[in-house]
Amino acid sequence: MNHLPVLPILLPLITGALLVTLPRLGLNAQRFISLGATVAGLGLVLWLGSMVLEHGRMVYALGGWAPPFGIVLVPDRLSVLMLVLTATLALPALIYACRGDDDAGAHFHALFQFQLMGLNGAFLTGDIFNLFVFFEVLLIASYALLLHGGGTARSRAGLHYVIINLIGSALFLLALGMLYGLTGTLNMADLAVRISQAPQAGQPLLQAASLVLLVVFGVKAALLPLLFWLPRAYTAAAAPVAALFAVMTKVGLYAMIRVFPLVFALDEPLAALTAWQWLWPLALATLALGGIGVLGATSLRNMTAYMVIVSTGTLMAIIALGSTEALAAALFYLVHTTLLTGGFFLFADLIARQRGAAGDYMVVTAAMKDRRTLGILFFFGAVALAGLPPFSGFVSKAWMLQASLAEGAAGIFWPLLLGAGFLMLVALSRAGSKFFWRQSPERDHDMRADRVRLACVIVLVGAGLALSLAAAPLMDYTRSVAAQLMAPGDYVRAAQEADLRLTGGH
Amino acid sequence: MEALYATAVGVLTACGIYLVLRGRTFPVIMGLTLLSHGVNLFLFASGRLALAAPAVIGESADPTDPLPQALVLTAIVISFAMTAFVVVLALRAAVELRNDHVDGVDPEEDWRP
C-alpha cells in the first residue's frame, strides 16, 4: 500500500514531538528543523496532490484495518486544495515568526507543527470521530499559540476562545453519539449509506444531529450568533499566529462542505436539508455584521479580523445556494481570502513595528521610515481585498455574483456582498490615509522594516495578483472539486471498493 | 434503568449549561466539567445499555459494543486535559486581570474598556 496519504500528518507530529523533547536545542536549531519540516510538508502535499490528480480519490486504511471498523484517510481534490493552501500560508507565517516572534514564549515551533498536524489531519480523514480528534489537536495547539507571548489582552481573549471551543467540542460529541446510536458507524461513507436507508422513525434525531453539527462547525467557522470570540482572539494573537488562524476558520467551512453533502444528502439535494436552509439567513447576517465591524474597527489587526468574518459570511452564503457552480466559486474565493487576510495580519504587525507606541491603531503619527514601500503594498493589498480589478478578489467576486444570479438569489445576495465590499473599501481607504498620507509634524520614526518580514508580506499580498493571473487553471480545478463534492455516490463507492480490497472480497 | 440513566444525563447537562452561562470563571469551569460528564454518559449509552455483557468476545453470549467505550475513553482524556488547562488559564487570567470574570471586567468595581 502507498503510505503517502498519512505522511502530511506524521511529518509535523514527529517534528513537533522532536522539538518538545529537545528543549535545549537552541532557537536557531529549532527554527531550522521547523522550517525544514514545513518546506518538506509543502513538497509532500504537492506530491500527494499530483497522485490524487492522477489516480482520482485515494482511500488509505490506517494500520491496514478495513473500513468501516478501521479509520480511513480519504485524500481527494478538496483535501488537496485545503492542504496546499494551509502549507502555502504556513510557510510565510513561519518565516515571519522566525524573525523574532517565536522568541516571545516557549515551544512556539512545536505548537506550530502540532497545529499543522491537526489541520492536515482534519482535511484528510474520512472518519467523523477522527475528524473530532483532529479538531481537538488543532484547537489545543491553537489555545497555546493564541497565548504565545503572554499579556492581559491574550489571557482575556484566550479564556473566551477556550471556553466556547470546549462547549463546541461537547456538542460535537453529542452529535456523534446521536449518529452512532442511530447508525452504529462513524465512517463517513458508511454513515452516508446507513442514513440514506434510515427508517422514518429515526429522522427527527438525525435532523437534530445535523443541526448540532451545524452549530459545532458554525462555532469553528464563526457564523453569526457564534462569532463574538473571533475579533478579540484574532486581534490579540501574535501576528504569525493570527495569519495561520486565517485558515482555521476555514476548517469549519471545510467540515460543512465535507460532511453535509456526503453524510446527510446522499440521495437528496443539498438545498433540501434543514441545516442547509438555516445556513442562508445566518450567513447573510454574518456578512452584514462583518461589514459593519470592518467599518468600526479601531486598529488594522481588528479590521482584518472583521474581514475574516466578512469572508466567512460570503463563503457560507454562497455555499448555502447548494449548486456546483456556487461551490466552485466559493472555493476560489476561499483560497483568495485566506492568503490575503493571512497576509494582512502580518502586514498590520509590520506597520505597527514602524509606528512606535501608536502600533496599528488608526491614529495619525509621525511618518514611517518605509512609508513608500509599505504604502504601495498597502494600496495593492487593499485593492485586492476589497475586490476591485485586476486582482483575484474581483475575479472571485464576479464569479460568485454570477453563480448567485443563476440560482435566483441575486436580489438579496448582491446588495449585501457589494455593500460589504464597499464598506471594506471605505474602511481600508480611511486606514490608508491615516497611516500613509496624514502625518503629524514630529520627527519621522526611524525604524526600518525587516527585509525578510517585508518579503513574507509581499509574497502573501502578491498572491492576489498571482491568483488572478492563474485564475483559469484554478477555476477549472475548483470546478472539478465542486463536481466531486456534489457526487457523494462516488465517494461511497470508492470507500466500499477499498473495503472489499482489504477484506479480500468477503 | 433507561429512565434513570436518561434523567442523569439530562440533569448533568442542564446543570452544566446553567453553570456555563454564569459570569465568573469557577462556575463556568464546573459547568464545563458537568457538561462533559453528561456528554460522556450520553456517548456511552449510544452503544445501548446492557447488564452483565462485557465488551469482550467469548466472555458472554451477547457481548456489548466496545466502540462507545473507546470513544468515551478518548473523550475523557481530552476533557480531563482541557479542564486542567482551562483551570490554569483562568488562574492566570484572574492574576493578570485582577478579577475572575469571564469577560475580564468586574461590573461592580473598576470598569475598564
Image (cartoon, rainbow, N blue to C red):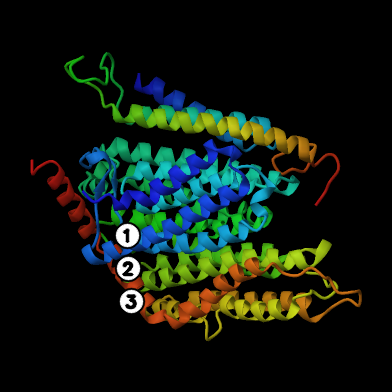
Label 1 near label 3: C-beta < 8 Å?
no
Picture layout, residue A100 above or below residue A358: above
Mark closest to the chain's N terminus, 2 or 3: 3
Chain letter behind tag 3: A
The amino acid type found where label 2 is placed reads Ala
Q: Position of residue A471 (x, y in %)?
A: 41, 80
Pointer 1 residue: A48
Q: Quadrant of residue B66?
A: top left
Mark seen at residue A482: 2
**Label 3: few (<14), some (14–19) or many (≥20) C-alpha neighbours in 10 Å:** few
**Quarter the C terminus of chain A occupies:** top left
Picture layout, residue A317 above or below residue B38: below
The amino acid type found where label 3 is placed reads Asp
Residue at horizontal 76 percent and vertical 75 percent from the top = A435
Residue at horizontal 51 percent and vertical 63 percent from the top = A89
Mark seen at residue A195: none
Pointer 3 residue: A476
